Amino acid sequence: MSSEYPPPPGYGQQDQYGQYGQSKPRNGLAVVALVLGIVALLLSWIFVGVVLSIVGLILGFSARKRVKRGQATNGGTATAAIVVNVVALVASIALSILWIVAGNWLIENGAGDYAQCLSQANGNEAAISQCEQQFRQDVGSAN
């Protein structure tokens, strides 16, 4: 029975990674990239998700390269990190576009006037009610 892999080092012998015994090389980059991807996915509703997912993708691809070179063993974690970061990036970009479109729509339909009206109302309930009615009328006429 032949094997293309060398036998594990015995007691007191070093393996190809300079480790003693039967230790395996680790890939902390993959774990960090996966954590960044999960956090980016959770924060995808704000722009921070874009930045975190890009950093996570860079680390995920670096971790994958380490696995291919044989310097690490957790290729599945590196692949999962890349997938999660891609999903987080797409979600972050889509939600950022949605925020921009919604903001523009609000500005075009009197949100600034509504805010100014509320600040001039100074807590007067009748004035606040009038501001709300005017804003609803403005939004209703925009559709």
Image (cartoon, rainbow, N blue to C red):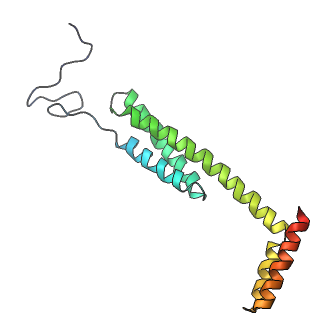
Q: Which residue is nearer to you in this view: 61 or 108?
A: 108
Residue farthest to the right, as pictured:
141
Q: Residue at position x 56%, y 57% from top?
A: 48
Query: Residue 131, how many percent across, how many down?
Result: 82, 82
Query: Residue 107, how many percent across, how many down?
Result: 81, 68
* Left or right of 18 in this view: 93: right
Determine which quarter of the picture holds residue 80.
Answer: top left
Determine which quarter of the picture holds residue 118.
Answer: bottom right
Determine which quarter of the picture holds residue 14.
Answer: top left
Query: Residue 120, how many percent across, how many down?
Result: 79, 89
* Left or right of 74 in this view: 133: right
Residue farthest to the left, as pictured:
11
Q: Residue at position x 80%, y 90% from top?
A: 126
* Left or right of 7 in this view: 48: right
Q: Which residue is nearer to you in this view: 112 or 14?
A: 112
Query: Residue 40, how many percent across, how many down?
Result: 52, 52
Question: In which quadrant will I find the N terminus?
Answer: top left
- Against 67, residue 29 (above or below) is below
Q: How many marks?
A: 0
Q: Residue at position x 67%, y 49% from top?
A: 94
Q: Which residue is nearer to you in this view: 46 or 12?
A: 46
Question: In which quadrant will I find the C terminus?
Answer: bottom right
